[in-house]
Amino acid sequence: MFKVEKRPVESRLMGYLSPVLAAVLTLVSGALLFLLLGQSPLEGLYTFFVMPLSDLYGLSELGVKAAPILLCAMGLAVCYRAKVWNIGAEGQLLFGALIGSWAALQLLQVEGAWVLPLVLLAGALGGMFWGLIPALLRTHFNTNEILTTIMLNYIALNVLLYGVHGPLKDPDGYNFPESALFSESTLLPTLLDGTRVHIGVLFALLAVAVVWVLLSRTFIGFQIRVLGLDSRAAHYAGYNEKRLVIFVLMLCGGLAGLAGVLEVTGPIGQLVPQVSPGYGYAAIIVAFLGRLHPVGILLASLLMALVYMGGEMVQIELGLPQALTGLFQGMLLLYLLACDFLIHYRIRLGGRATASVAAPVSEGA
Amino acid sequence: MTTAQPQPRLSLRNISKRFPGVLANDRVCLNLYPGEIHAMLGENGAGKSTLMKMIYGVMKPDEGEIYWQGGAVDIAEPAQARALGIGMVFQHFALFETLTVTENIALSLPAQEARDLKALGRRIREVSERYGMALEPDRLVHSLSIGARQRVEIVRCLIQDIKLLILDEPTSVLTPQEVEGLFKTLNQLAAEGCSILFISHKLNEVRALCHNATILRGGRVTGECKPVEESAHSIARMMVGEDTPLSTTYEKREGGDDFLVVRDLSLKSLDPFGTRLKNINLRVRKGEIVGIAGVAGNGQDELLAALSGERLGENAGQICVPAGRIALLPPLQRRIQGLAFVPEERLGRGAVPDMSLAENGLLTAFGAGLVKKGLVNWGRTRDFAQSIVDDFKVKCSGIDASAKSLSGGNLQKFIIGREIRQKPSLLLAAHPTWGVDIGAAVAIHKALIELRDAGTAILIVSEDIDELFEISDRICAICHGELSPLKAVSDTNIGEVGRWMTGDFDVVQDAGPTQGESHV
């Protein structure tokens, strides 16, 4: 039988290599998958991972896709550093998109440079509010944030659907569940002509810098790390756990909400039911793949964006189902968890589960 | 075996064990004869526990052989050691609190013996009576005192045919009276031919009990002796080497005005098996050290949590300092009022295991100018940690070393240094030298005395009575959540404090500043 035992020493090197190893294993499995689907593995991988980046437009799309993932993942990383298991970036993103859209629709007729910042702020505040709910539930009723944030994801999605089917539906939209198109002054400026890459990319990069400084230079970031590593020490030192939990969840909510409002004011331009193809969930993988470190997450978000684009590309070029995107995401996470597990533990064959019973014990005394 | 040259029951030959970066045991040899009580002496980190774990099959030696009754054995796991007749009582008991004594013991027995609990209960009673260890087989473990729990662990070993009993610092949790009882049992066992390995750093006990002693230092055997023929001082020298100062006596102080005043503090424990605090009254003066003796689990944790603010009181007046009533203030506010706290658990509370020493300095010392406008001044933080490492001679690879890489004693020096450096007006310290080697203990005591002389009020909770008598100015004991009278150390003696520890607070003649009168 198998026996799992803790390794006496964990390899630091392997800790860093584990995401790379996971990526390589994903590629190998992907190649096998293409083979089973009757495609040339090399061509499949080429189409999936290289073709999307073969021109400037492709590169710009990488930025478009990476920005929301990156924003969510930065927020999640802060939560996870505090061991607050927020799974709700998706819901926070959707709620931010909803509130931002509502604000944009109120301002359809208004011109001015302040309109866009106001809309973005509304979106971020919406996300913060959605993050505050599980935070208060945890600090006041001791609920498990994993469950509440997942539930709130579905609630946010349904509130958004209600919005586009009801009050926010475009009156001139032939009854499609979509809002009106946003006005020019509430749309994000693009960075490059002829592409969809917008200034949201800059917000995402700014978030990387802010979170980096937060975690490495500020005292509250230090408290967050202490709370995550050793909550008893945090309690002993007198750090206010409730305040920290509220802070990290609102920060993540704000960043995710910003990601949401950037989607609707950027590439989409209106509120639609499909604001996010699961960016908030993908960001969970990205946060761990990037080892909860800002730079690692930046790289991981690019990889994840590429997976999204690759999924579309194989659909167009090779006629394969787009479910491959989810498959590749899943494989990445699975391999990462497996690699991490094997860094901490080792598996021994032929456990001696029966040996202790077999040992004879002399009767008497 | 009856010849003039008896065969050793256990013989270790050139045992070596390596951990990454450390040679924990270096060619250790040891012979243990039937009926011998043998002490393993050494400071923390000398390799005693590692050696015992190899005998008990928890670890395997890298080199060397173990001979059992003359034959080479390869002890792969504790079950095998038990089958050979080796039993071990660990420092931290492995008992299920919600099960009875019999059920706990049954869990460690082979299935066919454990099935009949009634018969087992009779055997437990039989064994415990034969060795003078009072034990009720049907009692639930959570209702037992620490001493009784230890007896459960010992009986658990004796119920099988035992030839070698290993005890890891067994007296550290016992009252002086309980220690005497334990020694009687051990002497009786030895007289019947059982070999005993006794790990300790309490030299007077070793001298009273053990026939022979092996001294380890840095993983090597540095001496062997007959403890009766040596003085505690000369054994200590063998343990620490030539250049470490041994304990000194400190002048006792009267102290100034009251600083900490605890009035009628009663608190329920949050832990269902914890201790309820009953009517605690306590005053600690500026510039004095008050020691609280007591066996673990009698309310020490609850009292310290109430004083540090980790557990808030019920009304503000229960705990006062000159600046105000603080019983309702959270820990952070109390730190601002000048309180510092050295908790019992060094790793995982007093320090974050995976953080560096620099970061662990910041943990509580953020008020000492290390944080400005919410930003951490890492330069100053590193200097702060470095100064602790230098002044308190913390042995480490540098301030970037993680807290978990330090030995217990060195980490404790760091934590105490960190708290002292904040110039507190009140210092709470739980078990400041528990499991700490002699050299570090002396350094910690000196630091505490210096802090006292600088005018800080210090409250120390410890299970080590000798230590409390050495450094405290006034002393009391806690039992079942009640505090005994508080007396100047010069007006009392170890016997009286030992009685207080068992809840016998009677014969209070002098009218002390506090009254903690109670019944047995």
Image (spheres, rainbow, N blue to C red):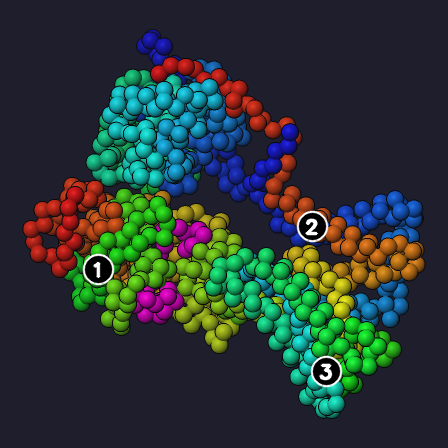
Q: Are marks 2 and 3 in contact (CB under 8 Å)?
A: no
Highlighted range, magenta: B326-351
Q: Position of residue A317 (x, y in %)?
A: 92, 59
* Quadrant into which the C terminus of chain B falls: top left
Q: Relative to residue B501, is residue A230 depicted above or below?
A: below
Q: Is residue B143 visible?
A: yes
Q: Relative to residue A4, is residue A101 depicted above or below?
A: below
Was residue B335 drawn as part of the magenta stretch in this picture?
Answer: yes
Look at discs 2 and 1 and give the one toward the viewer: 1
The answer to which quarter of the image holds residue B95 is top left
Disc 3/disc 1 C-alpha distance (Å): 64 Å
10 Å crowding of disc 3: few (<14), some (14-19), many (20+): many
Q: Which residue is the site of mark 1?
A: B264
Look at discs 2 and 3 and give the one toward the viewer: 3
Q: Is residue B468 visible?
A: no
Q: Position of residue A66 (x, y in %)?
A: 75, 67
Look at discs 3 and 1 and give the one toward the viewer: 3
Q: Is residue B126 left or right of residue A153?
A: left
Q: Earlier in the sequence, mark 2 or mark 3?
A: 3
Disc 2/disc 3 C-alpha distance (Å): 42 Å
Q: Which residue is the site of mark 2?
A: A336
Identify the secondary structure beneath mark 3: helix
Chain of residue at mark 2: A
Q: Nearer the viewer, residue A206 or B100?
A: B100
* Quadrant into which the N terminus of chain B falls: top left
Identify the secondary structure beneath mark 1: strand
